[in-house]
């Protein structure tokens, strides 16, 4: 919801609100983007068993998965089990995001005037990112954001664009909130689109020489 125009999925503060696969198609001109919202793991053991089958069915369809973890959450054993049991074949598609950076200790040090973390909070966020890297060994660097204040979101979007396959960069860029569609993001989208077109032409050129 912090990334795209409008509210693209229901968000609840207490009860898990996504119990199945929710799909949303966003359109802008000739571009369209499908956002898939999957249920979070760790609600309870029975549901996690159901979610394993659900994830395995859907993951192969996705260009990128944003795996969101609360910055102050220390109980990651369920995430680790799910990662090893389900997600590892799809590591290239996963970007870890530490959200609610404003709540990491010492949370009272968060500067509400500038919506930025204190020096101690920055150190703790870096330590948490290092812990995520050590635990999951992801292919992409973990990002830290405070979605409610907007801190870190622009940097996360730039990382997200680098993680996307070339063919997906332009559709994503067209759907971002205007403030997030920076010159860097636009450049990445243009470069990705050009690379995707080049690959398509290369494939077509190669296939034209195949015997009938």
Image: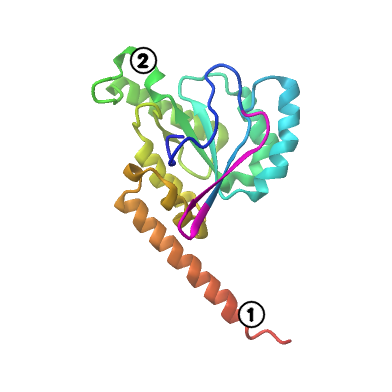
Locate residue 46, reporting x and y percent: 75, 22
Query: What residue is disc 1 on?
Result: 207
Q: Is residue 33 left or right of residue 51?
A: left
Identity of the residue drawn at 49% across and 28% down:
131
Looking at the picture, tell me which residue is in the foreground, 150 or 155: 150
Looking at the picture, tell me which residue is in the foreground, 102 or 119: 102
Separation of disc 1 and disc 2 at Cα?
58 Å
Query: What residue is disc 2 on?
Result: 107
Q: Is residue 2 above or below residue 175?
A: above
Disc 2 crowd rating (10 Å Cα; few below 14, some 14-19, many 20+) is some
- Secondary structure beneath dot 1 equals helix
Locate residue 44, reporting x and y percent: 69, 19
Disc 1 crowd rating (10 Å Cα; few below 14, some 14-19, many 20+) is few
Quarter of the image that includes the C terminus = bottom right
Can residue 40 be seen from the camera position used here?
A: yes
Locate residue 49, reporting x and y percent: 75, 28
Q: Quadrant of residue 193?
A: bottom left
| Segment tinted magenta in the rendering | 18-32
Looking at the picture, tell me which residue is in the foreground, 158 or 186: 186
């Amino acid at each position: 919801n912090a990334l795209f125009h409008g509210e693209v999925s229901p968000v609840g503060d207490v009860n898990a609100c996504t119990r199945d696969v929710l799909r949303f198609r966003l359109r802008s001109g000739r571009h369209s983007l499908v956002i898939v919202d999957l249920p979070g793991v760790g609600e309870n053991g029975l549901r996690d068993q159901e979610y394993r089958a659900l994830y395995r069915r859907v993951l192969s369809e996705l260009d990128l998965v944003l795996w969101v973890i609360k910055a102050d959450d220390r109980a990651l054993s369920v995430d680790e089990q799910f990662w090893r049991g389900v997600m590892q074949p799809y590591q290239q598609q996963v970007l870890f995001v530490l959200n609610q950076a404003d709540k990491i200790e010492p949370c009272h040090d968060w500067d509400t005037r500038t919506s930025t973390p204190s020096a101690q909070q920055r150190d703790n966020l870096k330590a948490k990112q290092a812990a995520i890297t050590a635990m999951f060994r992801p292919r992409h660097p973990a990002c830290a954001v405070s979605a409610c204040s907007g801190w870190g979101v622009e940097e996360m979007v730039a990382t997200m664009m680098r993680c996307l396959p070339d063919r997906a960069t332009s559709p994503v860029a067209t759907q971002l909130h205007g403030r997030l569609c920076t010159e860097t993001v636009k450049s990445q989208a243009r470069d990705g689109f050009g690379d995707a077109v080049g690959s398509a032409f290369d494939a077509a050129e190669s296939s034209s020489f195949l015997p009938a």
